[in-house]
Image (tube, grey):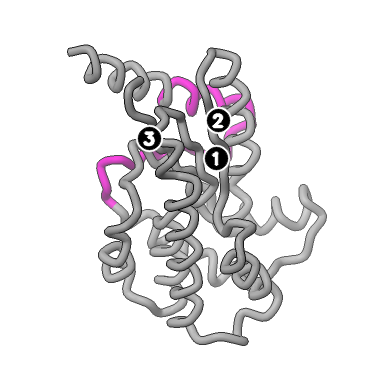
Amino acid sequence: MSTGLLIAFEGIDGTGKSTQLRLLAAYLQQQGYTVVATREPTDGPYGRQIRALYHNRRQVSPERELELFLLDRQQHVDLCIQPALTRGDIVLTDRYFFSTAAYQGAAGCDPEAIFRRHGFAPEPDMVLLLTLTAAESVARIRELRGEGLNDFEQQEQLEKVATLFASFAHKCIVRINAAQPVEAVQDSIRKTVLQLIRRKRKGCTG
């Protein structure tokens, strides 16, 4: 492919995004593709500030929280995503600006205004939106991870986030039922992504 592909994994916490991204990356690499697997928040300076909020989200205002996500994403685009796309790589990102619209939207910011502030960020070729109820998500986090809930993972908050994710009508979004077994979810993802790659190749050669 002469230009790369950007695929974002989205959904509330506990849907298995990280696991599914890792499985897809390994599969695509086996098929001979160059894959860049990345995540947000990043490990950069703004990403580290965001992670510090996981256990005390109230230490900053919703507006400052949003600003940190925007600054982190700008660096992510400049240093990782755009260079990889220019090389023709397939970029898989665990969260992108749809998460910001949903999570910071649930915190009181305007989701549509958040979308409008992302003119600097490349539009994803596909958003794999993994769907799960907030109750199932919380159960997974507690039972499968053996972890407590951080400030972004409270059930009431996740219900608001899930409602916002469900309201997004962007054409790039493909919804995947994350309540299925891991293997079934991955099979659906692979089929969907391979269709995207075939369309992209056809567009490049047509």
In-front residue for pair 68/153? 68
* Residue topped by disc 3: 86
Question: As drawn, is 66 to the left or to the right of 120?
Answer: right
In-front residue for pair 89/109? 89
Question: As drawn, is 34 to the left or to the right of 26?
Answer: left
Return the x and y of residue 11 as percentages of the image width and height: 50, 51
Q: CA distance from mark 3 to mark 1?
A: 31 Å
In which quadrant is the N terminus drawn?
A: top left
Return the x and y of residue 59 as percentages of the image width and height: 62, 87
Return the x and y of residue 32 as percentages of the image width and height: 53, 14
Between label 2 and label 3, give the one nearer the viewer: 3
Q: Is residue 78 visible?
A: yes
Q: Which mark is residue 178?
A: 1
- Which stretch is magenta? 169-192
Q: Is label 2 in contact with label 3 (beta carbons under 8 Å)? A: no
Vertical side of 59 occupied by 2: above or below = above
Amino acid type at image mark 2: Val
Name of the residue lying farthest toward the right: 146
Amino acid type at image mark 3: Thr
The residue under the point 37% across, 54% down is 166
Q: Secondary structure at mark 1?
A: loop
Badge 1 density bin: few <14, some 14–19, many ≥20, Cα 10 Å: many
* Residue topped by disc 2: 185
Disc 3 or 1, which lies upstream in sequence? 3
Badge 3 density bin: few <14, some 14–19, many ≥20, Cα 10 Å: few
Vertical side of 39 occupied by 178: above or below = above
Q: Is label 2 in contact with label 1 (beta carbons under 8 Å)? A: yes
Q: CA distance from mark 2 to mark 1?
A: 6 Å
Q: Is residue 160 visible?
A: no
Amino acid type at image mark 1: Ala
Disc 2 or 1, which lies upstream in sequence? 1
Between label 3 and label 1, give the one nearer the viewer: 3
